[in-house]
Image (cartoon, grey):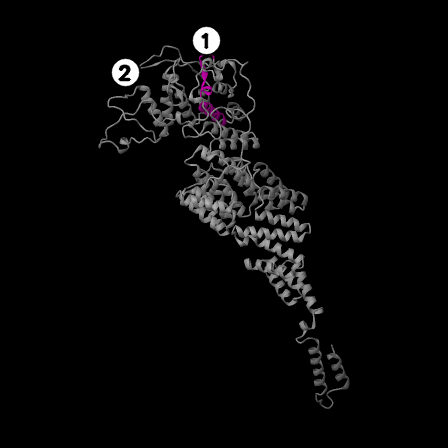
Amino acid sequence: MASTPPPIGSFAIPPAPRLPSTATSRNRSSIGSSFSFGPHPMISSFVGGDMSTSSIPRPLALDPNRSMLPNSPRSSPRRHRRTKDSSSRHPLANDTMDVFQDLEVEQEPGTGEWGMVDRMRLWRHDALMQHLYETAAFWGDKILSWTNDPNDAFWLAQTYFMTHQYSRAERLLTRPFPVTTPSSQSTPVNGFDQSMASSSAMGKLSLDTKGKGKETDVQHELIHRLPMGPAGLIKLPEALQESVSKLVDMSVACRYLAAQCQVRQGNWSDALEILGEANPFRHSDGSGASVPNVDGGIKVEASMCHLRGILMLKLNRGDQAKLCFMESLTLDVKCYDAFSQLISGEMMTPDEEWEFVQGLAYREQTKEDADFIQLMYTSRLRKHRHAEEHALTRQRLVDDFKLHDNPDVLYSFADALFTQLRWADCYMITSRILDLVAFHDATMPLHIACMYHLSHLHSKLFVLAHELVDREPENPISWYAVGVYYLSSNKWSQARQYFSKTSLMDPRFGPAWIAFAHTFAMEGEHDHAVTAYSTCARMFVGSHLPLLFVGMEQIVLSNHPLADEALNAANAACDTDPLLINELGVMTFTRGDFQRAADLFRRSLDLAHVTQSSQKSWTTTYLNLGTCYRKLKNYELAKTNYKRVLEIEPQHAQGLGFLAMVYHHLEDIDQAIVTYHEALSVDPINGHLIELLNLALESNAACGSWEKVYPGGEEAFRGMMASLKIKFNEKPKKAGEARTDDASRSEDSMNVG
């Protein structure tokens, strides 16, 4: 599918709020000037044009348009020495492949020997790759003590973060580091200037550039390591305050990592202060949706916008969270986390999703991979609309990109089948996905729902729930499966308990909120169900389902104005859901507009036919349509729809009862009586059917026509009676056996005409 041009109403990044002026504030490099960790000093440094007046140079680490690739441990500052293959060594020891796909420059023999710091950096990076975090932290701390290099501090903080030592990592990122202004332009190393990496207030690593590049000396006695006061407060002499700065002011990556540490500690407001309420780089040079990433990675600016959106959700500011995620994905289409939050959190309606995703700047940011990214994102959108486009998308992913067995592509197939209510087909696809991968977050709710709808799979649902709880006890989907099993067993209170636990573990897990409200509705607690559905509607503003269920509950409670309001709001969000159209028809029928109701029911069935859904799911709609025709006295069309119900479900009691009523209206009393009996065989205690059957029997006995009472009608009956009279009158009598009054009585008794 070719790239769709951006629509007219594509998402535009809102203007940045006015940043406070730094002209009256104290020098940015002064640690004691302010305890606020806001991003504005860093932004002022980045956008400032006069580098001579800044105590910190404008390093690449302050560029928000870059990714963390320059900071990644792709290689040691020294090139690896080539080793000769040896048959006595393990094959993995001879493997020189660079997992980061760096192009190594072949060096001359005898050059590029490593010093102690280089060797320890290799140990640190190798320990990180092998998940030996204690080893990485041990050697990384020694490296930082020698070099006082901000880049080494960044990787030590990363190590602490991976070992869940968030407070320790944050303290390292907010401590002062020495800063010097380079005399000449230098080559950046891992996102920091070489001059910054090689010169520090702690000590200096002297390099002999004429020899083999060895580190000749490490002077430890120049200036002691910068002190740290209690509670992270920094005590520095005034003479040193102008030559130091925090890592969060020296690197965008460090600021992002510090905010992540605050998030992990639950300090939402502090993390938001570090990132800023809005994107501070929004209108800076080299930033924007049309600007590609300079190194091919993911922009740190987009990651910061995504994290800002997470914080907005934590602070219950859903509208701002939506804008943050949209801005993140607009800045970098490769930021899938932002896309997942928008789509799985149902923050946009189906139409908004389609327009926004199709209008992203794919070709401007990733020219070579634009089609693939757009196809993958399109396959994850909701399937209520654009059925042909979704089918073409899946076909291209299978044919052009050979992803026929990829779990995400198979999930797109399963999601389309689930939308069409084809439970058995969807279950086959989800089972295939779970054969390929042990656990797929997007697939599991569909798989569990299909097992709920297919009654013969309830025992398998029981086994699956136990396995999930054993394997993934920290995953909310595991407890959701337990709740769905209890729901299938009609144990409402137990199911509600586990759905509540699921929503506490993950407040943004929509299926748990919907199922939690279902337990109230199925138990008959309609007021509580309305409250639960309304809460779900406030959390998932882009989904029409909570509003639809609110409307259905209000219909049960006979609150028709509130039902109309909820159903119309759901229709505004998604007007192609057959179930929603059916409920709108029910409301129209309640108001007495039978013709309009019949039109809505026909439209609902047409949409169901387009989606090729299971016919059994729509027996109620056929029943409703037949009832509308019966009210309009169009008995033939009513009979046709009732017979359609019985074709799908032959033992449908209401369908049999309504069909008998149609026969009764058409004065086919005998067929009506037979059909009433069939309905009562299915529902023997239905008082309405019993009353209608008695009415039909009385009508047949007292008010029926002669053709129904006697074959040939009234004339045939009277002819038969006359022949009987003649026959009895001409019968020979035996003497003394028959008296006159007896014959007279016999004649009177036969004269019933």
Magenta stretch in the rendered image = 235-263
Q: Can the viewer see residue 319?
A: yes
Q: Vertical placement of 408 versus 753: above or below? A: above
Towards the viewer: 151 or 696 = 151
Tell me where residue 90 sits by quadrant: top left
User: How dense is the environment of label 1, judged by Cα within 10 Å: few (below 14), some, or many (20 and up)?
Assistant: few
| Residue farthest left in this picture | 87
| Pointer 1 residue | 239
Q: Within the magenta stretch, is there residue 246?
A: yes
Where in the figure is residue 589, as x and y percent of width and height? 66, 51
Q: Can the viewer see residue 525?
A: no
Give amino acid for label 1: Ala
Residue at (52% x, 53% y) in the render: 614
Tell me where residue 244 sits by quadrant: top left
Towards the viewer: 581 or 480 = 581
Towards the viewer: 354 or 190 = 354
Q: Nearer the viewer, mark 1 or mark 2?
A: 2
| Pointer 2 residue | 210
Q: Within the magenta stretch, is there residue 599?
A: no
